[in-house]
C-alpha cells in the first residue's frame, strides 16, 4: 500500500535581493509536481517556524549574501532543539568550496551552486523523499 503524499518544499532566502535563482528553482520544482511554499527572506528561527507550520519535507535555503558556515549550522541546531528530524535541508546559491565539507559534516547532502540543472535538484528531492515518514 503506497503513500501518495505530495512532496512539500519550503524555499527561503538569506536576503531579499538577487532573487532570480530563488524563483527559477521554485518554478522548476513546481513544474515537476512538487509543492513549493515560497517563504521569502527569513532568518533561521523564522525558517523553522515556517517549516513546522507548513508541514514541509524539505527546506531549500538559498544563500547569496550570508555566511553559510554560520546560517546553515544554526538552522540545523534549531531543528534539533525542537526534535525535528524529518525535515531535510537543501542549500543552494553561493557556497564557497571550502565550506562544502563543513556543511556535509553537519548532514547537508544537497548542496547546489549556480549552474546546477533544475532536473538535478528535482532528482535529488525525489530520491531523498521518504513518503513513509
Image (cartoon, helix red, strand yellow):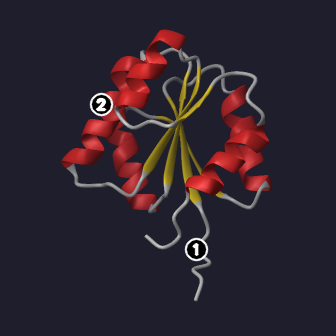
Left or right, 110 with respect to 113, comes to left
> Taking the image as drawn, is residue 36 in sight?
no
Residue lying farthest to the bottom in this orientation: 1
Quadrant location of the C terminus in the rendered image = bottom left
Q: Secondary structure at mark 1?
A: loop
Residue 112 x %, y %: 62, 29
* On screen, residue 56 above or below 103: below
- Residue linked to disc 2: 74
The residue depicted at 57 percent of the width and 59 percent of the height is 8
- Residue linked to disc 1: 5
Residue 102 x %, y %: 38, 21
Q: Earlier in the sequence, mark 2 or mark 1?
A: 1
Q: Residues within 10 Å of mark 1 (few under 14, many from 20)?
A: few
Q: Nearer the viewer, residue 87 or 124?
A: 124
Left or right, 14 with respect to 36, comes to left
Residue 42 x %, y %: 44, 34
The residue depicted at 48 percent of the width and 20 percent of the height is 100
The numbered disc on residue 98 is: none
The residue depicted at 77 percent of the width and 56 percent of the height is 32
> Taking the image as drawn, is residue 122 in sight?
yes
Q: Secondary structure at mark 2?
A: helix
Amino acid at each position: 500500500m503506497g503513500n501518495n503524499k505530495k512532496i512539500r518544499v519550503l524555499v527561503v532566502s538569506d536576503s531579499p535581493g538577487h532573487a532570480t535563482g530563488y524563483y527559477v528553482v521554485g518554478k522548476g520544482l513546481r513544474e515537476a509536481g512538487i509543492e513549493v511554499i515560497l517563504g521569502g527572506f527569513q532568518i533561521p528561527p523564522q525558517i523553522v517556524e515556517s517549516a513546522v507550520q507548513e508541514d514541509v519535507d524539505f527546506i531549500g535555503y538559498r544563500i547569496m549574501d550570508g555566511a553559510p558556515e554560520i546560517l546553515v549550522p544554526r538552522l540545523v541546531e534549531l531543528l534539533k532543539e525542537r526534535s525535528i528530524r524529518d525535515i531535510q535541508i537543501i542549500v543552494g546559491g553561493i557556497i564557497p568550496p571550502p565550506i562544502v565539507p563543513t556543511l556535509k559534516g553537519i548532514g547537508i547532502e544537497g548542496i547546489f551552486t549556480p549552474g546546477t540543472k533544475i532536473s538535478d535538484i528535482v532528482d535529488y528531492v525525489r530520491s531523498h523523499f521518504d513518503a513513509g515518514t
